[in-house]
Image: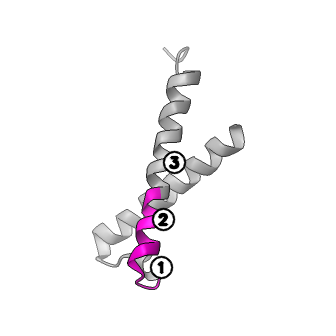
């Protein structure tokens, strides 16, 4: 479960970096890596949604920030 959380976090960090490159330079790195294939592009974008849902579940179920205050 810890490995899954680390992988999902890494995926979301990569997507954030790709999004910032697109926002600042106008070059879509993810679309370039998918060779312009729209089906593969949408499939990889759905992976980001699944990773975000997993991290949301993890934060609700295990409450790692409960004792931070």
The range drawn in magenta is 33-46
Q: Position of residue 4 (x, y in %)?
A: 66, 44
Secondary structure of residue under mark 2: helix
Pointers 1 and 2 in contact (CB under 8 A)?
Answer: yes
Q: Is residue 37 magenta?
A: yes
Q: Position of residue 54 (x, y in %)?
A: 53, 40
Q: Which residue position is annotated with label 1? A: 34
Residue that protrudes farthest toward the bottom in the picture: 35
Looking at the image, tell me whether mark 2 or mark 3 is earlier in sequence order.
2
Q: Position of residue 60 (x, y in %)?
A: 50, 24
Q: Is residue 35 magenta?
A: yes
Q: Residues within 10 Å of mark 2 (few under 14, many from 20)?
A: some
Q: Residue at x 42, y 74 (%)?
A: 39
Looking at the image, tell me whether mark 1 or mark 2 is earlier in sequence order.
1
Above or below 67: residue 46 = below
Q: Quadrant of the N terminus?
A: top right
Q: Position of residue 35 (x, y in %)?
A: 46, 85
Q: Which residue position is annotated with label 2? A: 44
Judge whether residue 64 can be spotted in this image: no
Secondary structure of residue under mark 1: loop
Q: Nearer the viewer, residue 33 or 42?
A: 42
Q: Which residue position is annotated with label 3? A: 51
Q: What is the quadrant of residue 64 in the picture? A: top right
Looking at the image, tell me whether mark 3 or mark 1 is earlier in sequence order.
1
The overriding secondary structure of the stretch rendered in magenta is: helix
Task: Describe the colour scheme in one phrase.
Answer: one colour
Q: Residue at x 37, y 64 (%)?
A: 19
Q: Is residue 11 left or right of residue 41?
A: right
Secondary structure of residue under mark 3: helix
Pointers 3 and 1 in contact (CB under 8 A)?
Answer: no
Disc 1 to disc 2, C-alpha distance: 9 Å
């Amino acid at each position: 479960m810890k490995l899954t959380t680390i992988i999902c976090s890494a995926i979301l960090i990569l997507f954030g970096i790709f999004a910032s490159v697109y926002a600042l330079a106008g070059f879509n790195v993810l679309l370039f890596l998918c060779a312009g294939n729209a089906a593969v592009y949408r499939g990889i974008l759905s992976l980001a949604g699944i990773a975000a849902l997993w991290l949301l579940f993890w934060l609700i179920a295990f409450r790692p920030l409960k004792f931070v205050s």
